[in-house]
Image (cartoon, grey):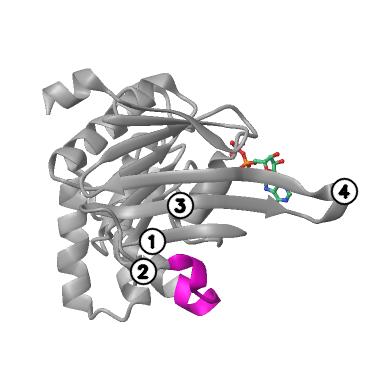
Amino acid sequence: MTSTSAGSVLELRGIHQVYGTGDAEVHALRGIDLSVAAGEYMAIMGPSGSGKSTLMNLLGCLDVASSGTYSLAGNDVNDLDEKELARVRNREIGFVFQSFNLVPRMTALQNTELPLAYGGVKYAERKRRGLEALEAVNLSHRADHRPHQLSGGQQQRVAIARALVTNPTLLLADEPTGNLDSESTHEILAIFDQLAAQGRTIVIITHEETVAGRAHRVVTVKDGLITTDRLNRERELAR
Ligand code: ADP
């Protein structure tokens, strides 16, 4: 266990990430300090190659840093082996990807329940929690539909339900609207607004100003460093 700042669910201190060795060495992150409080809705922006994916992989416990510390919900992540990392990842993080990654032959409900099936949760309980998660994205009326019967926005909402079904500490989304038209983008942003209003902790990696503009806090990364970290005042006042 590590001590995190009061109220923060995740805290990065002095994070460096170095890929390769010798002449091929790339310093993807060069000293990142970042705290995210419970209930915060944060966007991470930055140009291509700035280190966003590297940061996302660390936040999502998909990788560990070369140096520095990362504490997530009281877990000291930098010291974990692969197996322990997977356990923390499954328990604490709900992922949403640009490509929705739904299983085509499964219904919306079956897709949503999937993380619980892996976790050994019994059928009735899985169904109850799956429907609850679909309800949270206003899609319980489409529970029996397969992905090809749903619009892109609806498919991404199923993916968000699947991310929520384990009740994770952090909802981590990587370019969640990258494959969507503007109408579906608005649909997804409305869901994130709704989840933020319910107190979900959300971190979104995005290229798009319209997406970042909806978050309460926007962090910009450049050349492996955080260059700006600002509150979105209008959004804060609207809360
Ligand atoms: P972004 O997501 O902002 O485009 P990345 O985190 O993917 O940025 O990359 C940051 C830097 O690290 C880039 O210079 C990239 O080429 C390098 N990089 C990323 N992943 C690897 C890797 N697995 N091996 C070597 N270099 C990498």
Q: How many marks?
A: 4
Residue 103 found in image quarter: bottom left
Magenta residues: mostly which secondary structure?
helix
Q: Which residue is mark 2?
A: 75
The answer to the question of whether label 3 and label 2 lie on touching residues, with beta carbons closer than 8 A, is no
Whether residue 239 is situated above or below residue 166 in the rendered picture: above
Q: Quadrant of the C terminus?
A: top left
Q: Is residue 132 left or right of residue 114?
A: left
Residue 119 found in image quarter: bottom left
The CA span between labels 1 and 3 is 9 Å
The answer to the question of whether label 2 and label 1 lie on touching residues, with beta carbons closer than 8 A, is yes
Give the residues drawn in magenta, as a range: 77-85
Mark number, residue 13: 3
Q: Is residue 212 left or right of residue 123?
A: right
Which quarter of the frame holds ligand 1? top right
The answer to the question of whether label 4 and label 2 lie on touching residues, with beta carbons closer than 8 A, is no
Q: Earlier in the sequence, mark 4 or mark 3?
A: 3
The CA span between labels 3 and 2 is 14 Å
Residue 64 found in image quarter: bottom right
| Mark 1 vs mark 3: in front | 3
Q: Nearer the viewer, residue 57 or 152?
A: 57
Q: Earlier in the sequence, mark 4 or mark 1?
A: 4
Q: Residues within 10 Å of mark 3 (few under 14, many from 20)?
A: some
Amino acid type assigned to the residue bearing label 3 in the image: Arg
| Mark 4 vs mark 3: in front | 3
Amino acid type assigned to the residue bearing label 1 in the image: Ser
